[in-house]
Image (cartoon, helix red, strand yellow):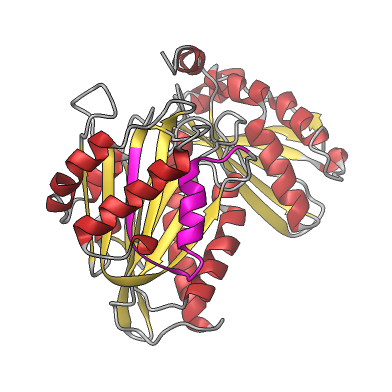
């Protein structure tokens, strides 16, 4: 398996594009994106668990009942959530996209992201749809820009791998910077592949993967209203269709996980106002549930996140988060260390502090990527969670997000 260029256009038969249609006031930023497959593809999706859901999710869920799709249309700048005519607008987005591409509107996935509670005018989208379809090509980066809100960098990745001697590809783009918290889904992620796989197995792969990837990302503790992860697999690679578990399915799962973990790290590292990517690695848990619970608790701890911002090796906050996680943990066995490109420093052994150099710890924690290593020493299960530091800039961004 190797990383390749192309993002969502790396897989055979997929094109993408992005334009500024006028939803966002800043004319230099694209606010409308389109992904298209030459042929109808197997499709799978997971959705936010927030009870308040954006209208596009309802429309997409209805369109994916048959497990098939051929295009994705997404706007940024307006979430189309909590609007009386939200469903109508989302359905119209699918309709005008289908007409422009000459496909069925039931094969269009619809997504929106941005401010909640503002009516979404369909006019700019309608007026720009022909320009958008004309822009389709090897333009993954344009689509990645078109779905950004407070993101500061585009997020895309692709890998190449083999199934049964056939070269296959899978790629993805994502947006996510704030309103990121475990409870799938909490961001927008669009993944494409040319692997031949049934809709049922594709859904199984995605639903399983998110438990250890997107469900383990937290920026600020807020679960979004709109976001979802979707995967389209059009089968154009020509491998024998995956219809059951086995070696081919495992290989696809590994490739999917490589893409999703990469996007998780990009989302966490680009958290609103963030200066550091935090990776929390737990080992030695007695079961999978414990490993995931404590990892989420630590990565979500505002005090731990603030300490990392200040490059303060305050390991007590890590133990505190473990203690209130609700997991059954023997805290007298817990070890903690911090790692970065500057090295590793142990700070806690068997639940108690040990002597360490504050100067060396500071040097380690001033790096852009920090790993919080926690050994529970009570079993063989592991888990990883991703997040970011908590900064002054986060409050500034969200203090006037709407205005």
**Above-or-below relation of 334 to 106:** above
Comparing 130 with 373, the one in front is: 130
**Above-or-below relation of 338 to 237:** above
* Quadrant of the rendering where the C terminus is positioned: top left
**Above-or-below relation of 164 to 129:** below
Comparing 361 with 180, the one in front is: 180
**Above-or-below relation of 168 to 311:** below
Q: Residue at x 36, y 75 (%)?
A: 195
In the image, taking residue 77 as reference, residue 218 lies left or right, namely right
Number of dots carrying numbers: 0
From which residue to which does the magenta span run? 52-75
Q: Is residue 145 visible?
A: no
* Quadrant of the rendering where the N terminus is positioned: bottom left
Comparing 202 with 296, the one in front is: 202
In the rendered image, residue 62 lying in the magenta stretch gets the answer yes
Q: Position of residue 386 (x, y in %)?
A: 55, 40
Q: Position of residue 275 (x, y in %)?
A: 44, 24
Q: Residue at x 30, y 83 (%)?
A: 238
* Image quadrant where residue 72 sits: bottom left
In the rendered image, residue 339 lying in the magenta stretch gets the answer no
Q: Where is residue 25 in the image (x, y as percent from the top left)?
A: 26, 21
Comparing 351 with 325, the one in front is: 325
Q: Which residue is drawn at 74% across and 39% down?
A: 335
Q: Can residue 198 be seen in this view?
A: yes
């Amino acid at each position: 398996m190797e990383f390749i260029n192309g993002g969502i256009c790396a897989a055979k038969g997929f094109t993408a594009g992005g334009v500024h249609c006028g939803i966002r006031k800043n004319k230099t930023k694209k606010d409308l994106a389109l992904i298209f497959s030459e042929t109808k593809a197997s499709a799978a999706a997971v959705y936010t668990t927030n009870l308040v859901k954006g209208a596009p999710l309802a429309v997409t869920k209805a369109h994916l009942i048959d497990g098939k799709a051929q295009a994705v249309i997404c706007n940024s700048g307006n979430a189309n959530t909590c609007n009386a005519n939200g469903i109508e607008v989302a359905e119209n987005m699918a309709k005008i996209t289908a007409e422009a591409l000459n496909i069925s509107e039931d094969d269009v996935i619809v997504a929106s992201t941005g401010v909640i509670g503002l009516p979404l005018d369909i006019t700019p989208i309608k007026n720009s749809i022909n320009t958008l379809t004309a822009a389709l090509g090897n333009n993954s980066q344009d689509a990645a820009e078109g779905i950004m809100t407070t993101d500061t960098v585009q997020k895309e990745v692709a890998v190449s791998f083999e199934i049964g001697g056939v070269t296959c590809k899978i790629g993805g783009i994502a947006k996510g910077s704030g309103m990121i918290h475990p409870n799938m889904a909490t961001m927008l992620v669009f993944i494409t592949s040319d692997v031949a796989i049934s809709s049922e197995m594709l859904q199984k792969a995605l639903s399983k993967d998110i438990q250890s990837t997107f469900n383990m990302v937290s920026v600020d503790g807020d679960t979004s209203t709109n976001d979802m992860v979707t995967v389209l697999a059009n089968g154009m690679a020509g491998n024998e269709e995956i219809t059951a578990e086995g070696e081919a399915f495992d290989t696809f799962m590994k490739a999917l996980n490589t893409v999703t973990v990469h996007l998780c790290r990009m989302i966490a590292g680009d958290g609103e106002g963030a200066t550091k990517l935090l990776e929390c690695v737990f080992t030695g848990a007695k079961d999978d549930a414990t490993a995931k619970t404590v990892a989420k608790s630590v990565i979500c701890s505002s005090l731990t996140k603030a300490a990392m911002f200040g490059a303060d090796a305050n390991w007590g906050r890590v133990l505190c988060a473990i203690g209130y996680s609700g997991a059954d943990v023997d805290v007298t066995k817990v070890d903690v260390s911090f790692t970065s490109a500057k090295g590793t420093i142990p700070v806690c052994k068997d639940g108690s502090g040990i002597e360490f150099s504050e100067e060396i710890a500071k040097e380690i924690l001033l790096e852009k990527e920090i790993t919080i290593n926690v050994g529970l020493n009570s079993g063989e299960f592991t888990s990883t969670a991703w997040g970011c530091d908590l900064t002054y800039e986060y409050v500034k961004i969200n203090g006037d997000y709407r205005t």
